[in-house]
Image (cartoon, rainbow, N blue to C red):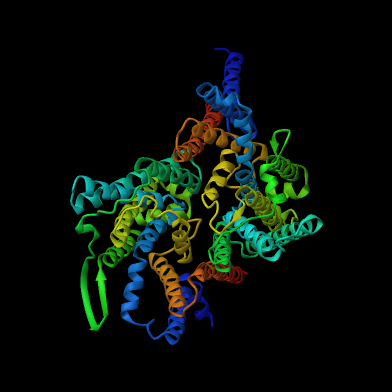
Amino acid sequence: MPEFTRIFARTEAVLAVIIVLLCVLFGLASPFFLTLPNFADLIEAYSVTTILAAGVFVVLVSGGIDISFAAVASAGQYLAAYVATSYGVGPVVAIGLACLLGLGLGAVNAMLTHYLRVWSIIITIATSSIYFALLIQITGGSEIYNLPDWWADRIVFLRWDFGPGEFVRITLPIVVMVAVVLLTHVLMSSTRIGRQVYALGGNPDAANRVGFNILRVQLFAYGYLGTLAGLAGFIQAHRVGQAVPTAMAGTELGVLAVAILGGASLVGGIGTMGGVVLGVLLLAILQNGLNLMGVSPFFFDVVIGLTILISISLTSFTARRRRQRKMGDAA
Amino acid sequence: MSQSSQERATAQANGVMQLFQLGGGNNLAGLMGFWAVLFVFFALMLPEAFSRPGTYQAMMFQIPELGLLSLAMAIPLISGGLNLAIIATANQLALLMGWILTTQMPVDAAGAELALWIAGALTSGLLLAVLIGTMTGAMVAVLGVHPILVTLGTMTLINGMSIYLGRGTTISGFPEPLLALSNGTVLGIPWSFLMFLVLALSVHLLLTRMPLGIRIHMIGSNLEATRYSGVDHRWVLISVYVLSSVLCWFAAVVMMSRFNSAGADFAQSYLLITILAAILGGIDPYGGFGRIAGLVVALAILQTISSGFNLMGLSAQMTLVFWGGTLILVMAVKRIAAARRARPRVAAAKQENTA
């Protein structure tokens, strides 16, 4: 079945099949699983992760790794909360400042990576420590609880009622997440700068010789992630109703794992936004399904760890088989 | 200008650069110079504290945990990999050993019986370390995927198992002899610090004097070439991660004795700092190069900053800011030094072309 194996060579297809199988399994195990309200809640719960993963995906495609986004998101969130509560500015200014700060911090990452010519994971480990520590130092680690109503109140765009207590809400985080996913997809697949990101990640030397402005592409990738991180920080505070300097600490590797699970490669040049969305979906469904089946929440990390290991094994074996087949064709 | 004077000027410039040059073979001199500058700075700022032996003893009490974990990170880095699971591994080993010592061992165990129980607990921890290392190494070797991915998975898995089996609780109250490791001193030097020095020296000798160490450098430098030269890279990779996990075991023992407790969420912030220390110490993040002596000096630099800031009343956050800043500064100096080295060569090549 050559067609069949070819389909499975794509990470997205493997993920989609696993997701469908899991849905059937969990659907049989729990009648609540395959309902719209559950699905809407699930999407909202993972909106911040998806927004961050979209940005991380762009940096990964460019051949870099940025783990400072959690610090950037926290900084953006806090700045927005501070100006909103102390100066009473409106949503446009607050969100704008959060995104602008993210853009600036992302640009710092890009320039350090570019000019020092060090692997970006090392640069962003350093900048992540600096951003987080400065944030805690400046804020004294104190939370901001009294967010203005326009920020803390739940914003529902659409609502369908099915019966008592059963409804589906399309809320602000879902709308923003969908917009970010679509924007990232279009940017990466249909614009010049998006294709340049792929080209840079695929072969930096070639990109350089063709005459790309490498710094510009890197500024785009890291700046885009920074901007999205500022936005994600805003949405995260919207969901929990407060701004905490350490809110996003420790989410770095989880988001990175999701992006990699979705087929983005650490060496750059490959991956699709759709794959990353499937990666988020896989983890979300696993967690939600296990929860509904009554599995201890303590067990989630075990499952997530196993999922990462199984997924990279599958990808590795299919890549190897493809390589062997190619060599067979050549011979 | 005659050619000889030009050459002499270049040589002089190179000599000055070499002193501060933090890349390549002269890494150590540059780092030690940097440490000396820091040391003089803090000694001038805090003449009273830096003339007290207690200050240095406090530093020596603090170095071993981070030091051992950094060694556990350094070996995979030199092999061209990374082990994100070191903290998770150390915590799981500490939890296992702590569980044996607090729930399995009779409360009134003493003398030979106590010694036997402690030895048993330590051995179980060591066996688990070897098991974790073997499985991680085998996955890295067989899958051919970057170790960041594999160890991201093992880190999550090991952490998850620790949390699941321990229900997220901490275990505390370990027997006295174990606690002595991090509290006792000999000639004023903490036992744990001596242990760290011996282990650092052992790792240094292993990496520079033994065939395995040379192979670890080789696969870090060029995996394919090493395979073609008849080295079974799989065994080397498994050894790398076993060594890394065994160093985590030493770190686990030191942590148990220092905190008198074990938990799944201990020392999480150390993960990135071990990478920071290793890179600061001149270990090439792309693999193949790096010396343990550099790492030890880097740890001394980090500890001097941390202790000095602490004594000056600055917060732990400012320490972290300066650690991160130091890493970026060191990389910037390396970059400039590399550019300076490349320039005369380019100029010479141009001259030859025009001639």
Q: In this rendering, does residue B348 appear at all?
A: no
A292 sits to left or right of B105: left
Residue A300 position, x and y percent, is: 50, 70
B241 sits to left or right of B271: right
Considering depth in this image, is A95 or B8 the residue closer to the camera? A95
Q: In this rendering, does residue B241 appear at all?
A: yes
Residue A104 position, x and y percent, is: 33, 44
Q: Quadrant of residue A59?
A: bottom left
The quarter of the picture where the C terminus of chain A appears is: bottom right
A212 sits to left or right of B8: left
* Above or below for A135 versus B224: above
Considering depth in this image, is B241 or A241 the residue closer to the camera? A241
The quarter of the picture where the N terminus of chain A appears is: bottom right
* Above or below for A165 versus A112: below
Looking at the image, how many numbered discs can be counted on the residues? 0
* Above or below for B158 versus A90: below
Residue A323 position, x and y percent, is: 58, 67
For the point 60% across and 22% down, the residue is B15
Q: Residue furthest front?
A: B108
Residue B29 position, x and y percent, is: 63, 28
Considering depth in this image, is B307 or B151 the residue closer to the camera? B307
* Above or below for A289 versus B245: below
A231 sits to left or right of A134: left
